[in-house]
Image (tube, grey):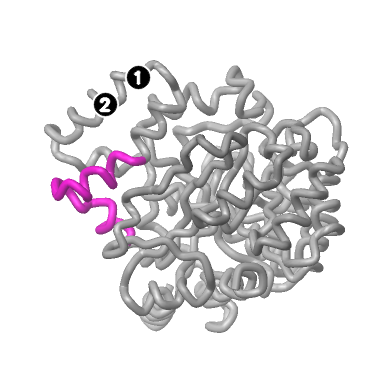
Amino acid sequence: MSDAEESRAAKLHREAIVIDLLSQRAGARIFDHYPSGLRADLDARINASNNIYERYSIAVNWPYDMALSGQSGLIYDWYREAGLSIISHQLPIFEDPLQGIDATPYLDGNRMRLVTTAAEMRAAKADNVIGSFANYQPLVSIPNDLSAITRAFEKGLRSLMLTYNSMTSVGSGCTERADAGLSHHGVRVVKHCNELGVIVDTSHCGPQTTLDACRFSKKPVTANHTSAKGLFSHSRGKDDDCLKAIAGTGGLIGVLAVPAYLTDSNKPSIEHMLDHIEYIAGLVGWQHVAIGTDWPLQAPIEIQRPLFSPSNADTGFRAEDALDVEVNLDGFDDCRDMPNITRGLVSRGWSDEAVIAVLGENALRVFAAVCG
């Protein structure tokens, strides 16, 4: 890139509202940057549990614990270096009304705060505070009692993925044997989300489930972290018909940074991610493209391996999905590389309007349409 292009990209990234629709936070590398004494504290907490999900949750939350205790604000330093304005966090849906919903205590209001509308996202940017919206990727079926979704909405849930990889009572996921589409319960979930103001997401949904969601939703639908199957065939990608259907709702496709879903190259790079952005923009228009990195994950690699192994039936990944938690894109090794997306689009000749839209304005439009 020329000096002029570098300057333009830096200005765009600095001034834009940069939204990661499916943020996995800082990435695994951050743990290597803590002093050995603090890292020993993390190891002790992790080793105290034998449950792989609990161990992962401990790792994800630990950098925030260090910040809240005043021992290290590294996580927020990395977000600022990334130029991130808005990220996301998981808010589970429980069938039992007596079962607690994670209130995410690290949303302290000073360095990071809950955002539920487009206006709140813009205010967070203006106040130089990281905003975080709540989404849910359910490994199990969404409860039949739709009031469970309502309770989560009241705690801040604003984006709900219908299925993960496998089939549930809602519909079929993208790695399932049968592409059955939405069930009657799934249709009810879509309609309830529309009534509440929760974005219907289809990222891990099978093709027919995605098409059904677009058919039954009266509001914009998203696939907030996916890729273009027409460019590289992978179960986690969306084919052209699905991409067109999502855009047809006024919705949004967030392009991810997971190497295995973008290319089979033995040297995956951010250029492959940019290729998918350009493919989708060429198919449905840049007005329907966003960023949902989903990678790399914020946990030490040894914690990630058993969670995303094909032998873990809970997550529905298969050997042919080729997911490898030890491989990142060259040029996107952790969240601090977010500016490289902006640099890449500028270097490919994108207009300022289109770059700013993909970084965040498209997402803000969808949030405004669905959530207010």
The residue that disc 2 covers is 45
Q: Which residues are magenta?
A: 61-79
Indicate yes or no whether the magenta region holds residue 71. yes
Quarter placement of the C terminus:
bottom right
Question: Viewed as shown, does residue 29 lie left or right of 154?
Answer: left
Q: Compared with residue 304, is residue 245 higher up or lower down, i.e. above or below?
A: below
Quarter placement of the N terminus:
bottom left
Q: Secondary structure at mark 1?
A: loop
Give the residue type at disc 1.
Answer: Ser
Query: Which residue is depicted at the point 45% across and 49% down?
Result: 330
Q: Compared with residue 85, is residue 91 higher up or lower down, i.e. above or below?
A: above
Looking at the rendered structure, which numbered label has been put on residue 77?
none
Numbered circles on residues, count:
2
Looking at the picture, tell me which residue is in the foreground, 7 or 217: 217
Q: Position of residue 49 (x, y in %)?
A: 35, 19
Indicate yes or no whether the magenta region holds residue 27. no
Q: Position of residue 183 (x, y in %)?
A: 85, 40
Q: Compared with residue 288, is residue 325 higher up or lower down, i.e. above or below?
A: above
Query: Which residue is depicted at the point 44% across and 23% down?
Result: 52
How crowded pointer 2 is (Cα within 10 Å; few <14, some 14-19, many 20+) is rated as some
Which quarter of the figure has residue 186?
top right
Would you say the residues marked 2 and 1 are in contact, meaning their CB atoms lie under 8 Å apart?
yes
Looking at the picture, tell me which residue is in the foreground, 265 or 110: 110
Give the residue type at disc 2.
Answer: Arg
Query: Which residue is depicted at the point 50% across and 77% down?
Result: 119
Looking at the rendered structure, which numbered label has been put on residue 49?
1
